[in-house]
Image (cartoon, grey):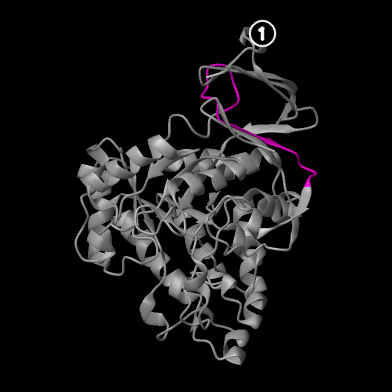
Amino acid sequence: MRDLLITGAALADGTTGDVGVRDGVFVAAGDVRDPERIDADGLLVLPGLVDPHTHLREPGREETETVATGTAAAARGGFTAVHAMANLDPVTDTAEAAEYLAALAARTASAEVVVVGSVTKGLGGEQLSEMGLMHASAAGVRMFSDDGRCVMDPLVMRRALTYAKTFDAVIAQHAQDTRLAGTGACCHESEISGRLGLPGWPAQAESTIIARDVELAELAGGRLHVCHVSTAEGVEVIRWAKRRGIAVTAEVTPHHLYLGTREVEGYDTTFKVNPPLRTDEHIEAVRGALADGTIDMVGTDHAPHAREDKDHPFDIALPGMIGLEQALGVVVETMVDTGRLDWPTLVERMSSAPARLTRSATQGRPIALGEPANLVLVDASARSVVDRDASASKSRNNPYHGRDLPDPVVATVWAGRVTHRR
């Protein structure tokens, strides 16, 4: 691996200097030999971003995404690690499946792939998966989630939280009570859903599950992570739980920070996502919660789909949208440029906090001598019009297509290797 020298970069705290990389760690600039050089004058150098919520689709749906293409998109977005959700085919519910994904990532990935195991066998919601064996395996699984489905049975959820506590793992819940919406629920329950004739998800389908689960986490003494929080009611439950000292963390997606129910008025299935896009009051609530730390981190919920999966009436098209490449730009647009987050706090929300979720020893670390060399170089002023056809992802269900957004990522370095350079 060739040495790297980054000159003139500014850290998030405003200090400026040269950054050397050798053998995958940060070293003094004078200690590099015949390096690859990157002129970073006018750029910020930040710790590599970490996504706590990514769908890579391999194995099972390689026509929509692979580990190679998904992590290439991640590198373009400034990410040096992604947490790969378990809803694959086969489901990551055994030690063998977890080790297979970890080995595949070791051969093909452009970012660290943190394997997420399922909570229940086959995502069926009834029997616990091989959580302990997955944790003890070479994959070292430390997070479990049935994401895409809610663990509806409270006894199963309690047992999962109790069991995971024994090896300091976290249970990540897709908080959505399927019994609170009619068949085919596909957008936020509001005036718009009624006018369009689309079955709606009420906000309480999210908040009631969060309320149940934080109580169960307190009872079990386990760690709970709430995926893709999207409602004001959900935010208030999490705020209450944190005041009570319950071990709960939460994430918000870039699309729930930026997009709203008005997008679905044209029945464009690109904007069908689960949980659904919400009204302005909910958007304001999650922005405020990310700013004050009630919501700990940003998770992309990058969900690639083939065109034929989206080319259906709105109520039966598959939900989900891609977002790794535009995630940082959307957070800059909604949170940094509006003054709600500064750059050090953005690093906390998009690097440090998600790295702590699974106790990473290599990600979310500072730019300092001897630390693992994971970084992203950022041009805070750059903008561009998003072109879905220019994506590194195999899929094109990009909700930001045609929008003028910040385009900050200039280069990404993972474990000392340049994985993306504009």
**Residue in the foreground of this view, choosing between 284 and 191:** 191
Q: Quadrant of the C terminus?
A: top right
Q: Residue at x 39, y 59 (%)?
A: 61
Residue 40 falls in image quadrant: top right
What percent of the width, then of the height, locates residue 59?
Answer: 35, 53
Query: Is residue 333 visible in this depiction of the protein?
Result: yes
Residue 409 percent across, percent down from the top left: 68, 41
Q: Is residue 368 magenta?
A: yes
In the rendered structure, the answer to whether residue 291 lies left or right of residue 137 reads right
Q: Quadrant of residue 346?
A: top right
Instruction: Give the SS element for disc 1.
Output: helix
The answer to whether residue 172 is magenta is: no
Of residues 253 and 78, the one nearer the viewer is: 78
In x, y percent, where is residue 275? 49, 69
Q: Is residue 338 visible?
A: no
Disc 1 residue type (three-letter) = Gly
Judge by depth and name the residue closer to the eye, 231 or 135: 135
Task: Judge by depth and name the residue closer to the eye, 422 or 297.
Answer: 422
Q: Residue 153 placed where, x, y %?
A: 26, 69
Pointer 1 residue: 30
- Residue drawn 60% across and 89% down? 196
Residue at screen point 53% across, 63% down? 235
Question: What secondary structure is the stretch in magenta mostly built from?
Answer: loop
Query: Which stretch did the figure color magenta?
Result: 366-382
